[in-house]
């Protein structure tokens, strides 16, 4: 094949790909101006609060219709018309059409306005925040059924159900600390918190990644039995019932000095070997001297 023809085809293909990428419209929604937070889980304390919806529209080769950005909430899917409730719109001529944010009250969402169940306990209700932009056709007109570009929906969850209690599956005691193994179930878990039975009102430890299945607690006295229990806390702040308690006893680790004395050493130096293996005691003595002072 002619090299010039092959280069031409390669160049044309690259230009077509670049042109397609440049002409693509994108529309994104987020609960944060930085990052891509797509889920917001709240409890009854949020009934009187508001949240922010951030959007970004990147125009391509097609112009938007004057109706601009349409944002609505649905208690089902974004395509469900019966549960659709309009939140706000931003015209294509507005200065914040391409990128902006809007504060929205939770009371505008179904179930948050007080008429249904806002403030009630034992409720798990999900809502979808949806958005779309209608596009003009190839000659610049907006017909009755225009092509639209949609954003991936956001999810607002009203949750006052309690997460299930974690289950302690194992516990090991060490020198001054312990490791607690657990299994945890439930949606939207935030952390697992460790408490001591008959302890103070402050938790002893926590695991911010419940999927890891264990946590550690330090600052414990040696040779002391401890009773611990766990609670799960979800993203809405709901706290589970306590798990069954598990006892664990810390086990002190012997240092060099204790091992030295167990093998017949005495005093503070290398002068007393006592009974036992002279070779072993010589090694212990040498190590002790290196750690404490020259022999």
Image (cartoon, helix red, strand yellow):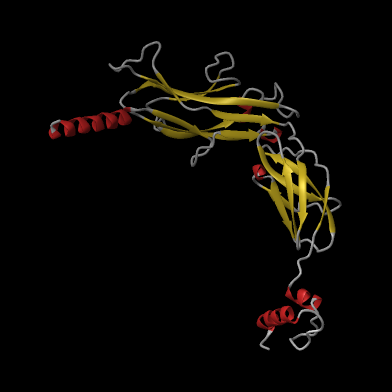
Residue at 59%, 16% in the rendered image: 83
Q: Quadrant of residue 282?
A: bottom right
Q: How many marks?
A: 0
Q: Quadrant of residue 134?
A: top left
Q: Quadrant of the C terminus?
A: bottom right
- Find residue 244 and report its horizontal and vertical position in percent: 83, 42
- State the residue lying farthest toward the right: 198
- Left or right: 115, with 133 as reference point: right
Compare residues 29 and 7 and report the one nearer the observer: 7
Residue at 66%, 23% in the rendered image: 111
Compare residues 250 and 235 and report the one nearer the observer: 250
Compare residues 173 and 20 and report the one nearer the observer: 173
- Find residue 272 and report its horizontal and vertical position in percent: 79, 87
- Left or right: 221, with 138 as reference point: right
- Find residue 48 and report its horizontal and vertical position in percent: 66, 33
Residue at 15%, 30% in the rendered image: 1
- State the residue lying farthest toward the top: 144
- Find residue 234 and report its horizontal and vertical position in percent: 69, 38
The vertical placement of 201 against 95, above or below, is: below
The vertical placement of 202 against 169, above or below, is: below
The vertical placement of 273 against 163, above or below, is: below
């Amino acid at each position: 094949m002619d090299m010039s023809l092959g280069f031409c085809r390669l160049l044309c293909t690259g230009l077509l790909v670049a042109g397609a990428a440049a002409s693509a419209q994108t529309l994104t929604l987020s609960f944060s101006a930085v990052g891509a937070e797509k889920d917001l889980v709240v409890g009854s304390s949020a009934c009187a609060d508001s949240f922010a919806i951030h959007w970004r529209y990147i125009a391509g080769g097609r112009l938007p219709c004057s109706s601009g950005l349409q944002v609505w909430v649905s208690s089902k899917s974004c395509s469900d018309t019966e549960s659709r409730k309009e939140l706000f719109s931003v015209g294509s001529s507005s200065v914040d059409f391409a990128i902006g944010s809007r504060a929205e009250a939770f009371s505008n969402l179904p179930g948050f306005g007080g008429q249904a169940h806002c403030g009630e306990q034992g409720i798990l209700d999900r809502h979808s925040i949806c958005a779309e932009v209608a596009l003009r056709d190839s000659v610049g007109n907006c017909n009755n059924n225009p092509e639209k570009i949609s954003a991936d929906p956001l999810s607002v969850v009203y949750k006052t159900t309690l997460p299930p209690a974690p289950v302690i599956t194992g516990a090991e005691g060490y020198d001054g600390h312990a490791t607690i193994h657990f299994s945890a179930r439930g949606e939207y878990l935030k952390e697992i918190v460790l408490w001591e039975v008959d302890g103070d009102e402050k938790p002893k430890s926590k695991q911010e990644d419940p999927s890891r299945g264990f946590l550690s607690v330090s600052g414990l006295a040696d040779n002391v039995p401890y009773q611990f229990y766990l609670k799960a806390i979800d993203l809405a702040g709901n706290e589970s019932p306590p798990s069954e308690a598990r006892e664990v006893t810390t086990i002190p680790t012997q240092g060099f000095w204790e091992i030295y004395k167990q093998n017949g050493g005495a005093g503070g130096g290398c002068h007393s070997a006592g009974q036992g293996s002279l070779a072993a005691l010589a090694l212990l003595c040498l190590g002790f001297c290196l750690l404490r002072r020259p022999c």
